[in-house]
């Protein structure tokens, strides 16, 4: 495949380190499968604030808009207090990308590797056959607040004399719910044909509407079974019987929390990739933003200690969902599985008897495995 453009936004903290390894794996994919990718690098987050005065410049946004996909690292505010200017907050870059490109479905696959069962706090018998994908609604909900203020949707701390109060707005339209629920059912139809819809309908009006929309969409997919599950019950099932879950669809904040919990099934947050997909079609699929689930990890930034697997697996999702290169995506995932199976470990997944390596060495091993397969 030629004429493909990927914009890389490394960002802050460990972002540049892990995205560098993901790009090297993409280059190895080019070599093995005879493709040609144009890879553009642009600053984002604190790096962009220092260079351009804002966390995401118009030039960077336009570069992303002209690309088939975006590979993202991580962003985060520097220590030392809040930044008053919204456009200069590193986190605002991610919100602008999500809103600007209509990214509404965040896919987070959770598939523990058998060779890493020992790195998880769960017993191996609970992890066997676990293979799920979270579909997190990304465009609305209570998650949007002070970083993306909207008139009529307050998110603030109020003070009146000695009285303090805080308010956040959880708002969903039927259309927002419907598009992510439909995406979840379409994904389930290509997998094990089961959808688990997670909400808090015994408390929240938004969840009552959520259930109603699921009931409307479900008949369009008669070959897919579905269930409703309260978010607290889902949190328990993730620990007690994770193999029972196939496609889990939920609103923004619930998805953010549950996927961090699910990461522990894989052994580390550093193992989890994600794909944020929008409605725009590319030649091979949908335009998307791809990033590891972990954050900037400033305590280990620049020390060659971060786990690059989440970023590398995010590159595999990019190949699959935006470029339509399914064989290539499978090959990257198999290379990760092979290297971890050989005992290579970054410190977050280290076990007795393993080969402890840094960010660069883990990336090199995966790249070599991909080329040698």
Image (cartoon, grey):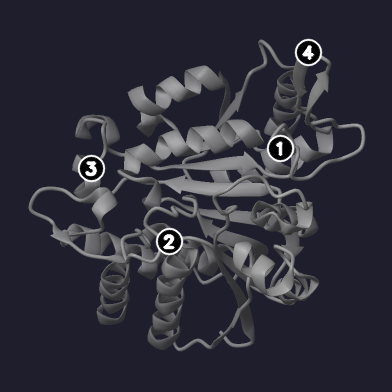
Mark 4 vs mark 1: give the one in front: 4
- The residue at the point 10 percent across, 48 percent down is 352
Residue 221, percent from left and from top: 65, 38
Mark 3 vs mark 2: give the one in front: 3
Q: CA distance from mark 3 to mark 2?
A: 18 Å
Q: Earlier in the sequence, mark 4 or mark 1?
A: 4
Dot 3: within a 10 Å radius of its alpha carbon, few (fewer than 14), some, or many (20 or more) residues?
A: many
Residue assigned mark 4: 162
Q: Earlier in the sequence, mark 2 or mark 1?
A: 1
Q: Are marks 2 and 4 in contact (CB under 8 Å)?
A: no
Position of residue 103 in the picture relative to residue 112 (left or right): right
Question: Is residue 327 something one can see in this rendering?
Answer: no
Position of residue 25 in the picture relative to residue 334 (left or right): right
Quadrant including the N terminus:
bottom right
Dot 1: within a 10 Å radius of its alpha carbon, few (fewer than 14), some, or many (20 or more) residues?
A: few
Residue 339, percent from left and from top: 23, 64
Residue assigned mark 2: 313
Q: Earlier in the sequence, mark 3 or mark 2?
A: 3
Q: Earlier in the sequence, mark 2 or mark 4?
A: 4
Quarter of the figure with residue 177: top right
Q: CA distance from mark 2 to mark 4?
A: 50 Å
Position of residue 18 in the picture relative to residue 197 (left or right): left
Quarter of the figure with residue 10: bottom right
- The residue at the point 30 percent across, 81 percent down is 371
Position of residue 373 in the picture relative to residue 203 (left or right): left
Q: In the rendered view, would you say 167 is above or below 7?
A: above
Quarter of the figure with residue 147: top right
Q: Earlier in the sequence, mark 3 or mark 4?
A: 3
Residue assigned mark 1: 220
- The residue at the point 81 percent across, 21 percent down is 159
């Amino acid at each position: 495949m030629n004429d493909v453009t990927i914009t890389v936004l490394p960002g802050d903290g460990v972002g540049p380190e892990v995205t560098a390894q993901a790009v090297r794996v993409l280059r190895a994919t080019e070599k093995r499968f005879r493709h040609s990718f144009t890879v553009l690098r642009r600053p984002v987050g604190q790096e962009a604030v220092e260079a351009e005065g804002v966390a995401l410049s118009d030039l960077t946004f336009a570069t992303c808009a002209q690309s088939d996909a975006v590979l993202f690292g991580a962003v985060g505010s520097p220590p030392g207090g809040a930044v008053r200017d919204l456009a200069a907050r590193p986190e605002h870059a991610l919100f602008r990308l999500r809103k600007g490109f209509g990214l509404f479905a965040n896919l987070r696959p959770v598939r523990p590797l058998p060779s890493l069962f020992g790195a998880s706090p769960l017993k191996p018998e609970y992890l066997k056959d676990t293979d799920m994908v979270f579909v997190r609604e990304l465009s609305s909900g209570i998650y949007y607040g002070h970083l993306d203020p909207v008139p009529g949707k307050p998110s603030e701390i109020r003070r009146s004399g000695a009285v303090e109060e805080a308010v956040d707005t959880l708002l969903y339209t039927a259309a927002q719910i419907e598009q992510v629920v439909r995406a979840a059912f379409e994904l389930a139809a290509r997998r094990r044909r089961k959808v688990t819809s997670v909400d808090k309908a015994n408390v929240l009006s938004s969840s009552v509407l959520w259930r109603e929309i699921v009931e409307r969409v479900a008949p369009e997919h008669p070959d897919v079974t579905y269930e409703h599950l309260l978010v607290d019950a889902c949190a328990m099932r993730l620990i007690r019987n994770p193999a029972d879950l196939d496609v889990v669809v939920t609103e923004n904040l619930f998805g953010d929390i549950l996927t961090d919990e699910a990461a522990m099934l894989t052994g580390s947050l550093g193992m989890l990739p994600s794909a944020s997909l929008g409605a725009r079609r590319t030649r091979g699929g949908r335009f998307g933003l791809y990033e590891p689930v972990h954050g900037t990890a400033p305590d280990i930034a620049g020390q060659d200690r971060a786990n690059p697997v989440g970023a590398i697996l995010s590159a595999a999702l990019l190949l699959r969902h935006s470029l339509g290169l399914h064989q290539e995506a499978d090959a990257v995932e198999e290379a990760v599985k092979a290297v971890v199976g050989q005992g290579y470990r970054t410190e977050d997944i280290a076990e007795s008897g393993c080969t402890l390596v840094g960010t660069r060495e883990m990336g090199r091993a995966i790249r070599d495995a991909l080329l040698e397969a």
